[in-house]
């Protein structure tokens, strides 16, 4: 191994040393174990919240239609409802006896609905020949037709004829496949966004910690500052790949144990194997883009509080970029989609969606090359800002770093020992 610049390693070799150091230090730390367990808690909370929400919605959907007519008409309507239900199915709401009206009695259905508690959502009054449905606007539109069918059956039992409809099932259709692919596109975008935002934020805490204990200044005195930037960025990318692999393996195992397989979902445009491969590549590109921004932003801060302040604009901007890429899913073939694919920060999200909805492979090759160019630009700009700002982390930081670094530089030297 050759020695360059007075015993200092070259840029890429020094970056590899920093990457290996950060990767092993984080991977074998207790904090990384808790980091891997971290997503389990929000997933458990979302699962419990989803179960409770589904139960609440099921209870809220229980809405009955009350029959308030003369006694004979109530019995006729309830019997007609059962006959119509055998033909129409659940489109017919549940009908219950609300009141048996005696001729001459005053009965105001609007007043009853507004003041009565319970699951009574509508009232049918009048007679089967001239029924009146009282309900809210949405339920009037939904139930007017089926209530008319029930009333017609009650007025003339057996007079209505309903031809038997023959059925023929198919595995899928163009509309259902398109809908399923759009859902896959949106799910892929959301998963990619959550992973990138969750994992890219690790570089900030690691950077602030090392700036606080002057490790950055020691490294800067021993190796090029650009190498520190590159090493930390790619070390965190490696840690992120480990985290995604662990979470993906656990998720796949849980789904398989629950009897869920990829065949239950619509095949993406490029197919599942290519979709997973492209997802991994776009994750790497998106992480390097956002990670380089976060590292550059982190170089401007000296404390965790300052990191939260200066990183907020970058985080909010990335959320806006994600929403813009999500909008491109519903505007395929238009300028919004093409702009989202061309803009570097939204390009990974837009292209993941395109992989789910379109069969062509060549746009992804072009997009990956385009994103690689911007990764190089972002890393170059981020490293330049990092180099100028990181040594200003404390008073006389550069001077202290240069003094301590001379002793520490031997850790990165190779070859024979040099004399002072």
Image (cartoon, rainbow, N blue to C red):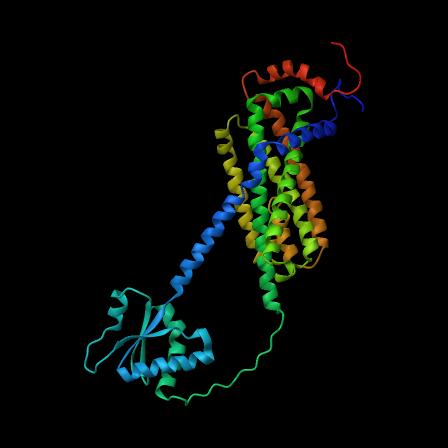
Would you place residue 45 above or below residue 292 in this image? below
Q: Which quarter of the picture shows residue 257? A: bottom right
Which residue appears farthest toward the front when viewing the image? 257
Q: How many marks?
A: 0
Q: Nearer the viewer, residue 303 or 247?
A: 247
- Residue pictured at 67% horizontal, 35% vertical: 234
| Residue 297 screen position, x and y as percent | 56, 32
| Residue 165 screen position, x and y as percent | 54, 82
Q: Nearer the viewer, residue 416 or 335?
A: 416
Q: Nearer the viewer, residue 195 or 158?
A: 158
Which residue appears farthest toward the top when viewing the image? 420
| Residue 244 screen position, x and y as percent | 62, 44
| Residue 90 screen position, x and y as percent | 45, 73
> Is residue 317 rendered to the left or right of residue 406?
left
- Rendered-image quadrant of the N terminus: top right
- Residue pictured at 49% horizontal, 52% vertical: 47
- Residue pictured at 60% horizontal, 58% vertical: 260
Q: Is residue 310 visible?
A: yes
Would you place residue 266 above or below residue 345 in this image? below
Which residue appears farthest toward the bottom when viewing the image? 159
Q: Is residue 347 visible?
A: no
> Is residue 221 rendered to the left or right of residue 152?
right
- Rendered-image quadrant of the C terminus: top right
- Residue pictured at 66% horizontal, 39% vertical: 375
Q: Which quarter of the picture shows residue 401? A: top right
């Amino acid at each position: 191994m050759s020695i360059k610049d007075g015993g200092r390693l070259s840029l890429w070799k020094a970056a590899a040393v920093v990457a290996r150091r950060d990767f092993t230090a984080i991977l074998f730390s207790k904090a990384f174990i808790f980091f891997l367990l971290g997503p389990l808690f929000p997933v458990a909370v979302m699962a419990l919240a989803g179960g409770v929400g589904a139960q609440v919605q099921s209870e809220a959907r229980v809405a009955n239609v009350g029959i308030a007519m003369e006694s004979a008409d109530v019995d006729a309507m309830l019997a007609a409802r059962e006959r119509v239900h055998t033909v129409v199915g659940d489109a017919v709401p549940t009908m219950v006896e609300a009141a048996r009206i005696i001729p001459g009695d005053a009965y105001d259905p609007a007043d009853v609905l507004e003041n009565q508690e319970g699951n009574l959502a509508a009232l049918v009054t009048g007679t089967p020949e001239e029924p009146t449905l009282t309900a809210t606007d949405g339920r009037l539109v939904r139930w007017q037709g089926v209530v008319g069918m029930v009333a017609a059956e009650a007025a003339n039992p057996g007079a209505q004829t309903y031809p038997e409809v023959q059925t023929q099932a198919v595995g899928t259709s163009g509309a259902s496949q398109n809908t399923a692919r759009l859902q896959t596109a949106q799910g892929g975008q959301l998963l990619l966004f959550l992973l990138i935002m969750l994992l890219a934020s690790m570089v900030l805490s690691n950077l602030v910690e090392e700036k606080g204990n002057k490790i950055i200044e020691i490294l800067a005195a021993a190796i090029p500052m650009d190498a520190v930037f590159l090493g930390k960025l790619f070390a965190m990318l490696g840690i992120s790949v480990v985290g995604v692999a662990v979470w993906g393996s656990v998720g796949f195992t849980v789904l398989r144990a629950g009897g869920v397989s990829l065949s239950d979902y619509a095949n993406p445009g490029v197919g599942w194997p290519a979709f997973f491969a492209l997802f991994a590549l776009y994750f790497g590109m998106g992480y390097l883009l956002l990670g380089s921004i976060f590292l550059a932003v982190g170089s401007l801060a000296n404390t965790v509080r300052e990191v939260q302040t200066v990183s907020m604009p970058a985080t909010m901007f990335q959320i806006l970029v994600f929403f813009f890429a999500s909008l491109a899913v519903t505007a395929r073939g238009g300028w919004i989609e093409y702009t989202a694919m061309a803009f570097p920060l939204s390009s990974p999200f837009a292209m993941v969606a395109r992989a789910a909805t379109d069969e062509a492979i060549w746009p992804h090759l072009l997009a990956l090359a385009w994103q690689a160019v911007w990764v190089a630009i972002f890393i170059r700009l981020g490293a330049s800002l990092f180099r100028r700002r990181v040594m200003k982390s404390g008073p006389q930081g550069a001077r202290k770093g240069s003094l301590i670094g001379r002793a520490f530089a031997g850790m990165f030297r190779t070859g024979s020992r040099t004399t002072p």
